[in-house]
Image: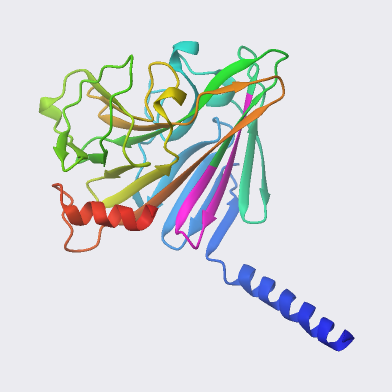
Amino acid sequence: MKCVQVIYFISLFFLISCSKMNSNTVIEKLQNGHYSIKHDNIALEIDPDLGARVISAKINEDELLLQERDSLLNWGSTFWLSPQSAWNWPPPQAIHLGNYQSRIEGDRLLLTSKVDAKFGISASKEFHYNEKKKCLEIQYKIVNETDSVQHYGPWEITVVPAEGAKVFFPMGEEPEGTKGNIEFENNNGIAWFKYEHKRMEVWHKIFNNPAEGWLAHINKERTLFIKSFELISPKDIAPAQGNVEVYISKKFKYIELENHGKYTILPPGESLYYKVNWYISKLPDGISADQYTEELVKLVRTFVR
């Protein structure tokens, strides 16, 4: 019996060791203090001293995210409290631009903000590459550090260059108290938008509660980027916000891909969690990047199923 147990534990140890050794994901701290997450041909970089912002997301060395520009506060991918009416502008300092304590735990990168002096809220971000699902899992956490009840929701904002961009998602209802001004094509329930600079005004935005929990984007390098998240009941959306939002700036030639989590009552010391999956891939040959096709939507659904 003892011999069988020894063999079992040796086998178990071997399987765990092989699992770690066979992992294609590498998380490391870089010399500049940033963190890198690499999996095969995908590489992400996170700056813990800039609100734990994802400052780069590349596939085959092709950059997906908008890069830093002078006089531009919002770029890369970041996280805010919802609704915006709670703070107007700029976003809460400690969460958006502050220093996050950071550490690597196994196959996860964990980052935690200081408590925001004005709002009494702290935020955490956990990054993990799920090799089975082939996606980057990001879990956000908001903690009420005050001695009074607070009411907030999570809000992820990912900024991409507008040139050559297409955005699409399963169209649902426009939330109450919002009014969008982006003209999307409606293709069998799929909203489709192609950026054309000459047709843009100063800015455009759409608010929507989609029929499925995903928002997709294709750039000029044929990179397909999908954000997958939990659908929320309209009654649980923060005031004057949407489960999905898309914002376009003509001046800066960028698009914000935004998604909101549940608007939550937080007693003192309580937390809320919000999980988003990122899928980054190159479009297969034979699938158009310039116009809506059923094949494109089927491809997205194979990722997020």
* Residue 17 as seen in the image, left or right of residue 45: right
Image position, residue 104 (x, y; %): 66, 49
Point out the residue furthest to the right here: 2
Query: Residue 30 location in percent, x, y?
Result: 58, 48
Q: Which residues are magenta?
A: 122-138
Q: 189 left or right of 99?
A: left
Depicted 241 relative to depicted 15: above or below? above
The residue lying at 42 percent from left, 47 percent from top is 278
Q: Residue 259: percent from the left, percent from the top?
A: 40, 33
Residue 60 visible in the snapshot? no
Vertical order, 35 against 38 (above or below): above
Most extreme residue toward the left, as rendered?
A: 198
In this figure, what is the number of numbered marks? 0
* Rendered-image quadrant of the N terminus: bottom right
Q: Nearer the viewer, residue 114 or 56?
A: 114
The C terminus lies in which quarter of the figure?
A: bottom left
| Above or below, 214 relative to 155 | below
Q: Nearer the viewer, residue 83 or 93?
A: 83
Query: Residue 268: in sight, yes or no?
Result: yes
Residue visible at 18% across and 51% down?
Answer: 289
Residue closer to the observer: 10 or 222 = 10
* Residue 76 rendering spot, x and y as whole percentages: 42, 35
Residue 232 image-quadrant placement: top left
Query: Taken as a whole, is the magenta stretch helix, strand or loop?
Result: strand
Determine whether, in the image, residue 275 is placed left or right of residue 281. right
Report if residue 264 lies within the magenta region.
Answer: no
